[in-house]
Image (cartoon, rainbow, N blue to C red):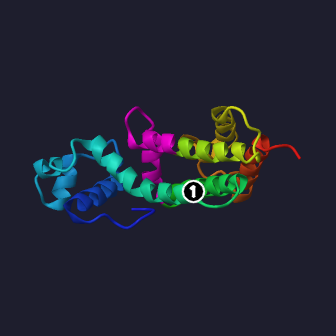
Amino acid sequence: MTGGPAPEGTRGRILVTALTEIRQIGLARMRISGVAARLGMSHANVYRYFADKAAIVDAILNDWLRPLELRLQDIVEGPDPADDKLERFLATLTRAYAETHRQDPALFRLLAGGLTSGTEALRHRRRIESLIERIIEEGNVTRLFQGGDTRRLGTLVLDLTHRFRDPTAVLDAGSDENASDARRDRAIRAAIRAISVRK
């Protein structure tokens, strides 16, 4: 899977096979019985590891997103000034999304299509928003940012980087050449300027 080592053991084999099925025939047509058949096991054996198809999708996303989130958390907890942290955080996140969208569109579609209640995709979105708010709170304390309502400033950053940060927007844009690295970097810098103290 994109973004980390292949999971091991029976659970890992199930996830790799399920993702292969999703890449080949799509999530809607992927069936637990088909995954089990590919692995030469009964579908009851798959259910020992995963309650349903949604649980498999959540596990696939977690295996991809967890290493990314750990990298982002390292940025948040690092010694850099908050404005530098926010720029690195957003650049790392948006580049990871863009790279996965190009290299593994089926996997990326799982993230973009999974933003409903209780899913790993939604939990990921909330963790990202929480980490951004932590950076902004630090910037407020150190007076690099405007101060005031951290959530309001966080929402402004999320809105200004929406095109490159929101999985659904990334998916909708497809291979649009306007979604270049330079344009993405300009949007990130504009978001940081918008919340920074005017000098």
The answer to whether 91 is drawn above or below residue 134 in the figure is: below
Identify the residue shown where x is 24% and y is 57%. 14
Front residue (pair 149, 109):
149
- Magenta residue span: 104-127
Location of residue 48 in the rendering, given as x and y in whole percent from the top left corner:
15, 49
Location of residue 131 in the rendering, given as x and y in whole percent from the top left corner:
56, 46
Q: Amino acid under label 1? A: Glu
Inspect this view and state whether residue 45 appears.
Answer: yes
Residue of label 1: 77
The answer to whether 160 is drawn above or below residue 105 in the figure is: above
Identify the residue shown where x is 57% and y is 56%. 77
On the picture, is 93 further left or further right than 86?
left
Location of residue 3 in the rendering, given as x and y in whole percent from the top left corner:
45, 62
Q: Secondary structure at mark 1?
A: helix
On the picture, is 63 further left or further right than 76?
left
Front residue (pair 23, 185):
185
Task: State whether the magenta stretch is mostly helix, strand or loop.
Answer: helix
Identify the residue shown where x is 52% and y is 60%. 71
Front residue (pair 121, 109):
121
On the picture, is 124 further left or further right than 118?
right
The question of residue 121 being in magenta is answered with: yes
On the picture, is 10 further left or further right than 130?
left
